[in-house]
Image (cartoon, rainbow, N blue to C red):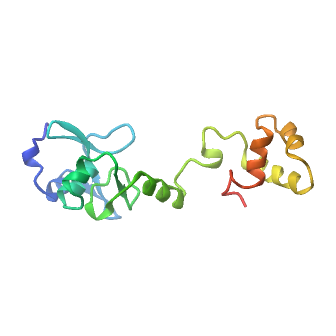
Amino acid sequence: MRTSSRSIKSVEWFKSVSRVDADGCWIWTRIASSDGYGRLNYKHKICRAHRLALFIAGGMSRKEFYSTSNVVMHTCDKPKCVNPAHLRVGTTADNVRDRVNKKRGAFGERNYGARLKENDVYLVRALAKCGWCNDEIAKVFPVITASGIKQVVNRSSWKHIK
């Protein structure tokens, strides 16, 4: 069923096409993108459901709605939530900071580009503490360069490992 722009008049419409979960999230039950965010056609343009919900609820201006320089962030961290009380406008930098602070990013072993395991990081740092130079450690772990070893030792990478 296609929805006309005229029928999307209020936040109540969003509530009617969602199911409420235990956290008070209005979970979007219609079409979603491959990244899990709800989407719909609004004024002949595909848009994200949570962004439109916040706009209709008055949580963002028309200028912000049409701007590509801001994002709508979920305080509940559920991509399909369209409850305006769980949404706020922010920048991409705000969104990245939020992701890092909540430890939702792909860091450490969860990062597809990781060349070390957590146990390797402990060993690299222990070897450095024992006086091994970065070049020597890199020979033990040939998947990483001496400069990569330096980043691990100085904690500019693998920061979450103490």
At x 72% / y 55%, what residue is drawn? 155
- Quadrant position of the N terminus in the picture: top left
Residue 92 is left or right of residue 8, and the answer is right
50, 64: nearer the viewer: 64
Q: Residue 159: x and y, percent?
A: 67, 56
The C terminus lies in quadrant: bottom right
In the image, 104: left or right of 49? right
| x, y percent for residue 46 | 23, 38
User: 8 or 97: which is nearer to us?
Assistant: 97
Q: Residue at x 74, y 50 (%)?
A: 152
Q: In the drawing, does residue 101 fall left or right of residue 33? A: right
Name of the residue lying farthest toward the right: 131
**138 relative position to 70: left or right:** right
In the rendered image, residue 124, in percent from the top left (x then y), is placed at: 82, 49
> In the displayed structure, would residue 24 be above or below residue 14?
below
> Residue 96: x and y, percent?
48, 53
Is residue 50 visible from the viewing direction of this image? yes
Residue at (26%, 61%) from the top-left corner? 84
Please count the marks in the image: 0
Is residue 28 shown to the viewer in this render?
Answer: no
Q: Residue at x 35, y 64 (%)?
A: 23
